Image (tube, rainbow, N blue to C red):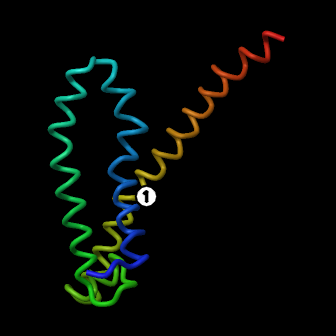
């Protein structure tokens, strides 16, 4: 199978969605419970994330043409009206996550600046 730049972008996007929440929120919340709850959640979460992202990437990869995305794949398989419905559902599934990431990244960055740089400024 020949690799395309579009496929690489999809792989990186799916990897980012799978790992992004774990990097940003999982260690903060799960770490308060200790090491073993993190390990237990890893065993529960991994199959769900892996299987769902594998299915989504296969769904998009099977669309005809190398430059197709989820909207084009859904239109090819289900028709125009259903593809529009799937695209709207996909948007409402991803958009709140992006909003949560924006707030989380802003709060984490603000906390980092406050706790790392302000003590240096007050030491002078």
The reply, left or right, for residue 64 in relation to residue 69 is left
Task: Using the rendered view, name the quadrant where residue 34 is placed.
Answer: top left
The spot of residue 10 in percent (x, y) is 37, 68
The spot of residue 70 in percent (x, y) is 32, 76
Give whichever of 46, 109 is nearer the camera. 46
Residue located farthest toward the top when viewing the structure as drawn: 123
Question: Which residue is identified by label 1?
Answer: 95
Give whichever of 40, 70 is nearer the camera. 40
Residue positioned 33% across, 18% down in the render: 32
The spot of residue 20 in percent (x, y) is 40, 46
Task: Using the rendered view, name the quadrant where residue 66 is placed.
Answer: bottom left
Mark 1 crowd level (few <14, some 14–19, many ≥20, 10 Å Cα): few
Query: Relative to 48, does residue 118 appear above or below in the rendering?
Result: above
Query: Relative to 68, does residue 91 appear above or below in the rendering?
Result: above
The reply, left or right, for residue 43 in relation to residue 118 is left
Task: Using the rendered view, name the quadrant where residue 55 is placed.
Answer: bottom left
The reply, left or right, for residue 62 in relation to residue 22 is left
Residue positioned 36% across, 29% down in the render: 27
Residue positioned 71% across, 14% down in the render: 119
Q: Where does the N terminus fall, quadrant-wise?
A: bottom left
């Amino acid at each position: 199978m020949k690799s395309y730049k579009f496929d690489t972008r999809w792989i990186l996007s799916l990897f980012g969605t799978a790992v992004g929440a774990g990097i940003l929120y999982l260690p903060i919340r799960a770490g308060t419970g200790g090491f073993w709850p993190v390990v237990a959640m890893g065993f529960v979460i991994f199959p769900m994330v892996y299987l769902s992202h594998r299915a989504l990437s296969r769904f998009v990869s099977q669309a005809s043409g190398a430059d197709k995305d989820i909207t084009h794949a859904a239109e090819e398989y289900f028709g125009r009206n259903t593809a529009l419905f799937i695209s709207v559902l996909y948007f409402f599934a991803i958009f709140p996550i992006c909003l949560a990431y924006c707030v989380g990244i802003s709060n984490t960055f603000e906390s980092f600046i406050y706790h790392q740089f302000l003590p240096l400024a007050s030491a002078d």
